[in-house]
Image (tube, helix red, strand yellow):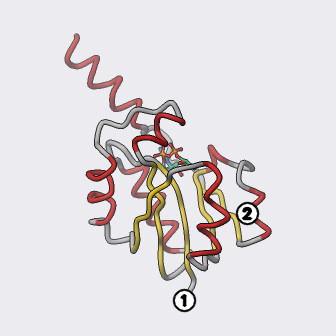
Amino acid sequence: MKKVLTYGTFDLLHYGHINLLKRAKDLGDHLTVAISTDEFNALKKKEAYHSFENRKMILESIRYVDKVIPENTWEQKVQDVLEHNIDIFVMGDDWKGKFDFLKEYCEVIYLPRTVGISTSKIKNDLFKVTNG
Ligand code: C2G
């Protein structure tokens, strides 16, 4: 069984996230998603609208996702790859090159981001709508 792993906040879930998760799953047979905890988001200087628990519940309901684990630190990736017997690590290409150190442990693939959608775009567009 080919196991795939990816990381993210996945807040205000949108089709760019789904495109990533679908393509990641298509690379193997089992997809694990490490979702950033609220505390780790603070380290990433990101504030999620939905709590970790609710983002976890949402991700677990997606047909492409087989397992959801917490992402607490930048440093846990090697341990995650080893512990979960991961064959392929996947991230959107906004992270291209940043996780090449994992090539020692598994295949590393950066997939093209979906253009035209992001959580910040959603927030900005909603702000414009509500504030004219
Ligand atoms: N993504 C995408 N297309 C978009 C938006 C996001 O392909 N239009 C991808 C990102 O490249 C990432 C995943 O969806 O691979 C999750 O995006 P975020 O929730 O923004 O993840 P991020 O905050 O970048 O967290 O340790 C890694 C970090 O936790 C990654």
Q: Secondary structure at mark 2?
A: helix
Q: Which residue is nearer to you in this view: 13 or 50? A: 50
Tell me the quarter of the image containing the C terminus. top left
Location of residue 107 by image quarter: bottom right
Q: Distance from label 1 to label 2 (Cα)?
A: 20 Å
Residue beneath disc 1: 1
Q: Secondary structure at mark 1?
A: loop
Mark identifier at residue 29: none
Q: Is residue 1 above or below residue 36?
A: below
The total of numbered circles placed on residues is: 2
Please provide percent x and percent y for residue 128. Answer: 28, 17
In the image, what residue occupies the spot 44% across and 58% down? 70
Tell me the quarter of the image containing the N terminus. bottom right
In the image, what residue occupies the spot 61% across and 58% down? 76
Please provide percent x and percent y for residue 115. Answer: 50, 42
> Callout 1: few (<14), some (14-19), or many (20+) C-alpha neighbours within 10 Å?
few
Q: Which residue is nearer to you in this view: 127 or 44? A: 44
Between disc 1 and disc 2, whose residue precedes? 1
Q: Amino acid at mark 2?
A: Leu
Please provide percent x and percent y for residue 45. Answer: 51, 30
Q: Are marks 1 and 2 in contact (CB under 8 Å)?
A: no
Q: Which residue is nearer to you in this view: 86 or 70? A: 70
Q: As drawn, is 37 to the left or to the right of 104?
A: left
For this orientation, the residue located farthest to the top is 132
In the image, what residue occupies the spot 57% across and 49% down? 73
In the image, what residue occupies the spot 44% across and 63% down? 69
Residue beneath disc 2: 102
Closer to the observer: label 1 or label 2?
Answer: 2
> Callout 2: few (<14), some (14-19), or many (20+) C-alpha neighbours within 10 Å?
some
Please provide percent x and percent y for residue 100. Answer: 76, 57
